[in-house]
Image (spheres, rainbow, N blue to C red):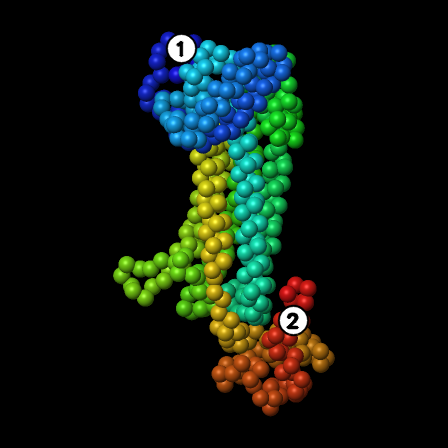
Amino acid sequence: MKLWGGRFRKEENKLMEDFNSSLPFDKRLYKQDIIGSIAHVEMLHKSGILTEDERSKIIEGLNSILQDIEEGKLLIEGDYEDIHSFMEVNLIKRIGDVGKKMHTSRSRNDQVALDMKLFAKENGLMVSEMISELMNTIEKLANDNIYIMPGYTHLQRAQVVTFKHHMMAYHSMLRRDKKRIDNTVELLDESPLGSCALAGTTYDIDRSFTAEKLGFKKTVDNFMDGVSDRDYLIELLSDFSIIMMHLSRLSEELIIWSSQEFNFIQIDDAYATGSSIMPQKKNPDAAELIRGKTGRVYGALIAMLVTMKGIPLAYNKDMQEDKQQFFDALDTVIACLSIMNEMLKTLKVKEENMRKAVKAGFLNATELADYLVNKGIAFRDAHRIVGEVVILCEDKGLAIEDMSLEDLQSIDTNFEEDVYDFIDYDKVFEKGIKRELL
Ligand code: ARG
């Protein structure tokens, strides 16, 4: 079952065989491998390297393998070195010696580079599409809940914002995430097929033909780079890491907001779990898991960067390590994007509790200082005066807007009746976060 037995005097050690095999994980590339092989065979025929009869037998064989795999009649397992060996051996089993011609002017090096690029492109675009869906969900949630809430810095109540404005911050982050993925896909869009092992081939092949057939914008400029480049996986892992960082920050907020201390939101029962001992518990596990899984996506990025950093050109077996890391990170991002989407669709926002928190937080203190500035007081002096107002409010257990005018005037005589309108929360918000950003 080896593609390379000829120059060996001894059998491969069993431990080595298992250690070397990538089939258990690169079987995921079966479709890309077959599609790539079909394009390659078409090109060999067009270039006069395969006859029409050879071309159609090989393509028929490859299509029947594809069909049997998809129908579950052919399992991708056994002592094969990788998905490429599996395909070639199975093709030869089905169509005989003519199958041995498929690998003319091709190496597994450009073959695997092609498979990974096709896989990365397709799945990158799928993630990009999922980001769009999540953006739509966020926009809807935001528009359904325009209520005012405290905005925080240092997790201390700072100024008034709205739930909508808060959520739309994530919309902006996701818009950049989507663009990053689209850019990565655009940059990777060059076909490596025809680079062969590292130095091209003596055959007069047509790389542009396969590139076009497989939907690539162009062919790679350099064969050695063609088989050695895994930048696009690192870029996608970096894009995924940033997406996860955003989802993790959002998760953290959902966790905090659903605590009894905040009580701003209610996560739907369908996305929470209970405790085996404490009957009253409802835990935000989905959000916690997203936050937790972020680490493993970062891990994949770092692993991949470290794998690539010390290997000379061109192909080295180290690069086989790209697959498990990339597949795992991809699956994680996909799972997290979909669970976040569902969780947000069913989220309940507690308007009253957010409004109470706004009132209790002196969130119009900055505007109170602005009021004094409008009366001709320097901002730094106004800042100190309002500080004193806050102390008095705390002593009396009142919000600023609930203080009597006499009390305010006992601290500074510039306060007049119009102050209450100036520091009204709804107006403050509208003035601060301008109409167009609402
Ligand atoms: N399984 C290998 C990989 O994933 C395929 C390429 C093998 N190439 C080679 N020269 N041994 O990288």
| Residue where numbered disc 2 is placed | 430
Q: Position of residue 343 (x, y in %)?
A: 46, 56
For the residue pair 315 and 142, the one nearer the viewer reads as 142
For the residue pair 141 and 241, the one nearer the viewer reads as 141
Assign a secondary structure to mark 2.
Answer: helix
Compared with 168, 29 (above or below) is above
Quarter occupied by residue 118: top right
Compared with 392, 269 (above or below) is above
- Which residue appears at 60% of the width and 51% of the height? 175
- Which residue appears at 51% of the width and 29% of the height? 32
Assign a secondary structure to mark 1.
Answer: loop
Which disc is residue 365 wearing? Answer: none
Q: Position of residue 262 (x, y in %)?
A: 45, 68
Asked whether, in this view, residue 14 is left or right of residue 309, the answer is: left
Single out the mark in the foreground, 2 or 1: 2
- Which residue appears at 60% of the width and 44% of the height? 180
- Which residue appears at 65% of the width and 23% of the height? 208
Which disc is residue 8 wearing? Answer: 1
Which mark sits nearer the N-terminus, 2 or 1? 1
Q: Position of residue 430 (x, y in %)?
A: 65, 71
In three-dimensional space, the C-alpha distance between marks 2 and 1, rounded to whole angstroms, equals: 78 Å
Q: Is residue 85 visible?
A: no
Q: Position of residue 385 (x, y in %)?
A: 61, 80
Compared with 48, 154 (above or below) is below
Asked whether, in this view, residue 49 is left or right of residue 330, the answer is: right
Q: Amino acid at mark 2?
A: Glu
Q: Residues within 10 Å of mark 2 (few under 14, many from 20)?
A: some
